[in-house]
Amino acid sequence: MSHSTLTIPFVDFSFQHQPIQAQLEQAIQEVMQRGDYVLGQALGEFERAFTQACGTAYGVGVASGTDAIALGLQACGIGLGDEVILPANTFVATLIGVLRSGAIPVFVDCDPQTALIDLNAAEKAITAHTRAIIPVHLYGQMVSPRHLLNLASTYDLLIFEDAAQAHLAEREGYRAGSVGIAAAFSFYPSKNLGAFGDGGMVVTQEEIVAETLRSLRNYGATRKYFHTDYGTNSRLDTLQAAVLKTKLPHLSGWNDDRYRIAQLYDRLLEPLADYGIVPIANQSGSGHVYHLYVIRTTEDCLSDRSELQTSLSNLGIQTGIHYPIPCHLQPAFQHLGYEIGSFPHAEALSQEILSLPMYPGLSESAIAQVVSALATLIGSSQSSRLVGSFSHLADQPSLILS
Ligand SMILES: *Cc1c(COP(=O)(O)O)cnc(C)c1O
């Protein structure tokens, strides 16, 4: 069958952008006509629209998600001498943000089933110097807001969410970004809401945090040429804001699509559990926005993860690893004093995880093709047969994108 020779990319933006190409071009042209490239009209409009979508009071656009973390922490008054708890298994930008704020990063391990920060481990890491905790809503699944808020109120900690992978995610009645004092989002192109370049935002319920951020991103100036804060240059470009504002109304539909894709993966992968292939657990139901769909090649899996990745690639199926080396083992951060064995779950996960193709518009036939390739590669003839019973999907065009 010809479908088996098709290449399946890890991400593909064309399904998002083609249907709204005319609107995107118009939004860009409007910025060109106004010429307000920095701190322009579309920035304010997008800030208001996104913050409303998050259920927060204020939003301040910055140049990247990394800056959103660094400047966001600074605006919350977190810095020198403060300890900030974060998971070892996050994208390195979470760590970079903490270090740039001047605070001391304190890593904790993760839950091996969900890959989310282990809040019991976090509780044990709290000292008299702990000011804040950064829950990373990894892969699109929120860290339990109830558990977080309990911890924060018991120990008088600030919660600063890294929501870079969790636009519009929900759990226990909370929306990502609305749990703590402030939250960082990234609009890197492949995020659930992506710009045509870099971008980020801090959302917050606190007016003073938002005001400080508006100054910090603009050379620390509260008015022109009057510098009250130790700031920098980190604005979200008006052009990027115009693109993001145009895409925002479609975000929730794209997230629904991701969820449906994940459910199909879940269903098709079920028989592979006996062969050691287990998806990262979803404990938040339909509030998971599946920035990534990640499986584990557990110790019961006879195939080695990197062999599996190479074989899939040879079959035209692109995958990723998020992330192959935990933060505490990265060469640049050895001075923090952690070593191999410090966080056994994060370290084991880094060896086991594999991110499968996931993007709005990914067809059911492509999903079936990915799972059937996996089943064949791990030597599960039984699984191949079971997946084969879904092979009718392979001959259908995409049923997913409406
Ligand atoms: C993408 C990402 C960031 C950083 O965002 P940039 O816009 O790339 O700087 C931070 N944290 C997490 C968890 C991310 O996935």
Image (spheres, grey):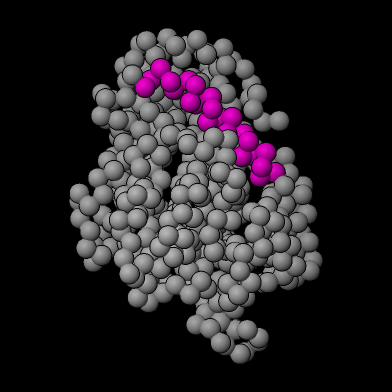
Query: Position of 311 compared to 370: left or right?
Result: left
For image coordinates 58% across by 35% down, the residue present is 286
Q: Quadrant of the C terminus?
A: top right
Asked if the magenta segment contains residue 270, the reply would be yes
For image coordinates 34% across by 55% down, the residue present is 123
**How many numbered markers are drawn?**
0
When the figure is inspected, residue 314 is found, relative to residue 213, above or below; the finding is above
When the figure is inspected, residue 228 is found, relative to residue 364, above or below; the finding is below
When the figure is inspected, residue 317 is found, relative to residue 147, above or below; the finding is above
Residue 338 in view here = yes
For image coordinates 71% across by 61% down, the residue present is 48
Residue 384 position in % (x across, y down): 41, 13
Q: Nearer the viewer, residue 197 or 50?
A: 50
Q: Nearer the viewer, residue 332 or 129?
A: 129
Residue found farthest to the front: 154
Q: Nearer the viewer, residue 128 or 98?
A: 128
For image coordinates 69% across by 49% down, the residue present is 247
Residue 192 in view here = no
Query: Position of 58 compared to 179: left or right?
Result: right
Q: Which residues are magenta?
A: 250-273
Residue 284 position in % (x across, y down): 52, 38
Location of residue 337 (image quadrant): bottom left
Residue 80 position in % (x across, y down): 37, 77
Residue 368 position in % (x across, y down): 50, 21
Location of residue 312 (image quadrant): top left
Name the dominant secondary structure of the magenta segment: helix
Asked if the magenta segment contains residue 322, the reply would be no
Residue found farthest to the left: 340
